[in-house]
Image: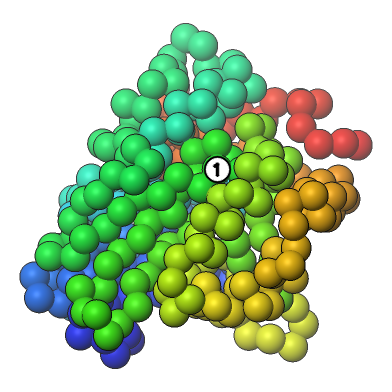
């Protein structure tokens, strides 16, 4: 495995098409593992799905001899379809997300007019984490941290390394990106820039050496994709929220920037899959699943 630490193994899988990073984190002592934010390939032009990214994860699991306990979603993503269900059918594990996914489901249930065949109660997932809830991956202790603002349901997952000499790792989802990219947008339904700032400060109050692993990277020209930073690095260099940027300044920056951003290309296809924990919409009487595209509902002309 690529991580040199004997206490906690982390293997990243970068998807160039969406900029997403999926992680497999494992306890080397027990070979128990969790998958974080898995990607199902989707071609918008043809409407075809594929499992290229998920197959990379499966190959690593087999090669490393890992058993999957958890498939962890940091939130209902707007930029890729989740491969959680595809992976669960092949390697098991419980699919989990934050309990506030119910709020996100309720919003998008209305948007997609799913009133008759979809209940926004979180039952699509195997487990809904509460803020501060602890769980285990093998012998590793993990904790779910509620970090809303990008969406109401965003979670970060803090994994204790099990070794006092090795910093903990936190999978921060879309809350923060690499320091030269900044932070997540806060203009999705249920998003809020004030809430996002406070969530970020919660993460940045962790010990300076804490490893922060981001879900996406959109690197500036001249830099290769990267996905690991630290609390200290973010506090010193994050272009949106470094130390010295107060709440009012961040909110002004974030809301001003969000007003200029386009709707993500895959938000309408992806959300209706991701609120179902990676299930495609139920097949119709011809055996085909259909994604719905509501017209004139999001963004601007």
Q: Residue at x 41, y 65 (%)?
A: 170
In terms of depth relative to the viewer, which is nearer, 47 or 218? Answer: 218
Q: In the image, residue 138 lies at what x, y percent? A: 13, 63
Q: Residue at x 20, y 73 (%)?
A: 162
Q: Residue at x 60, y 17 (%)?
A: 110
Q: Is residue 3 visible?
A: yes
In terms of depth relative to the viewer, which is nearer, 21 or 90? Answer: 21
> Where the C terminus falls, by quadrant?
top right
Q: Seen in the image, is 137 located left or right of residue 277?
A: left
Q: Quadrant of residue 157?
A: bottom left
The count of marks equals: 1
Q: Residue at x 35, y 78 (%)?
A: 167
Q: In the image, residue 108 lies at what x, y percent? A: 58, 26
In the displayed structure, 131 sits above or below 210; it is above
In the displayed structure, 23 sits above or below 11; it is above
> Where the N terminus falls, by quadrant?
bottom left
Q: In the image, residue 28 lies at what x, y percent? A: 15, 77
């Amino acid at each position: 495995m690529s991580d040199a630490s004997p206490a906690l193994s982390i293997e990243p899988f970068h998807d160039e098409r969406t900029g997403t990073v999926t992680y497999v984190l494992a306890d080397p002592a027990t070979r128990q593992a969790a998958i974080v934010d898995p990607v199902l390939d989707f071609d918008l032009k043809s409407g075809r799905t594929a499992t290229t990214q998920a197959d990379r994860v499966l190959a690593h699991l087999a090669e490393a001899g890992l058993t999957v306990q958890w498939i962890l979603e940091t939130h209902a993503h707007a930029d890729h379809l989740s491969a959680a269900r595809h992976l669960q059918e092949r390697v098991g594990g419980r699919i989990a997300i934050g309990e506030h996914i119910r709020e996100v489901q309720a919003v998008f249930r209305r948007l997609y007019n799913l009133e008759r065949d979809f209940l926004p109660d979180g039952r699509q997932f195997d487990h809904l984490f509460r803020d501060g809830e602890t769980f285990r991956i093998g012998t590793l202790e993990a904790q779910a941290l509620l970090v809303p603002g990008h969406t109401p349901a965003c979670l970060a997952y803090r994994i204790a390394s099990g070794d006092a000499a090795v910093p903990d790792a936190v999978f921060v989802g879309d809350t923060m990106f690499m320091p030269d990219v900044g932070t997540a947008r806060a203009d999705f339904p249920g998003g809020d820039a004030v809430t996002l700032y406070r969530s970020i400060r919660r993460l940045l109050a962790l010990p300076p050496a804490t490893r922060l692993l981001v879900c996406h990277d959109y690197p500036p020209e001249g830099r290769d994709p990267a996905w690991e930073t630290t609390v200290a690095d973010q506090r010193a260099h994050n272009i949106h929220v470094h130390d010295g940027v107060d709440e009012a300044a961040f909110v002004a920056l974030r809301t001003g920037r969000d007003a200029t951003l386009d709707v993500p290309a895959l938000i309408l296809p992806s959300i209706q899959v991701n609120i179902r924990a990676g299930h495609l919409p139920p097949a119709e009487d011809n055996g085909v699943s259909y994604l719905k595209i509501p017209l004139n509902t999001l963004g601007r002309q």
